Image: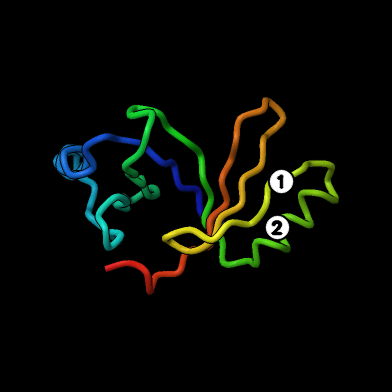
Amino acid sequence: MRVLPIRYSSDVEALTRFYTALGLSTGPVSRPGGWVELPADGGTLAVHRGAGAGRCELAFETDELLEDVADRLREAGYEPGPVIDEGFGRSLRVPDPDGVWVQINAYDRELYT
């Protein structure tokens, strides 16, 4: 599983320019342009157009079936939300012990440019 912090922005293009000026590379971009991945030596930052500009979210990328992840979480006593079809693939959200939502994503790279 790969850790993927998500930074929300009202101007994805401007934030992408800023982080590439800091030294991150431009990776996969969604076809509508509302999602950009910025790989770095130590991980990847995702920039996402959405409400709550400036907000950050913790996400994980997995190749595992999300239903299997959900089953494992339930067995450990956590209650994940439903698996949802997204514009990038599928996702699952679950609150951590502090009540902060964590997102687990299974990407379909065919949906990217």
| Mark 2 secondary-structure assignment | helix
In the image: residue 74, left or right of residue 65: right
- Residue most toward the bottom? 110
Residue at 30% over, 60% down: 30
In the rendered image, residue 101, in percent from the top left (x then y), is placed at: 60, 35
**Residue holding disc 1:** 80
Residue 103 % position (x, y): 56, 46
Q: Pointer 2 and pointer 1: residues touching (CB < 8 Å)?
A: yes
Q: Earlier in the sequence, mark 2 or mark 1?
A: 2
The image shows residue 92 at horizontal and vertical percentages of: 61, 52
**Closer to us: 41 or 34:** 34
- For image coordinates 63% across by 66% down, the residue present is 64
| Quadrant of the rendered image containing residue 33 | bottom left
Please determine whether, in this image, residue 112 is positioned above or below residue 50.
Answer: below
Report the side of 49 relative to 90 (left or right).
left
59 to the left or right of 23: right
Closer-to-camera residue (72/32): 32
Q: Residue at point 67% right, 28% down?
A: 99
Residue type at the position of mark 2: Val
Q: Nearer the viewer, mark 2 or mark 1?
A: 1
SS class, disc 1 = loop
Q: Which residue is mark 2?
A: 69
Quarter holding the N terminus is bottom right
Quadrant that contains the C terminus: bottom left
Amino acid type at circle 1 is Pro
Whether residue 101 appears in this view of the structure is yes
Q: Can residue 38 be seen here? A: no
Residue beneath the point at 61% across and 30% down? 100
Image spot of residue 109 (x, y percent)? 40, 70
Identify the coloring: rainbow
Q: Quadrant of residue 54?
A: top left
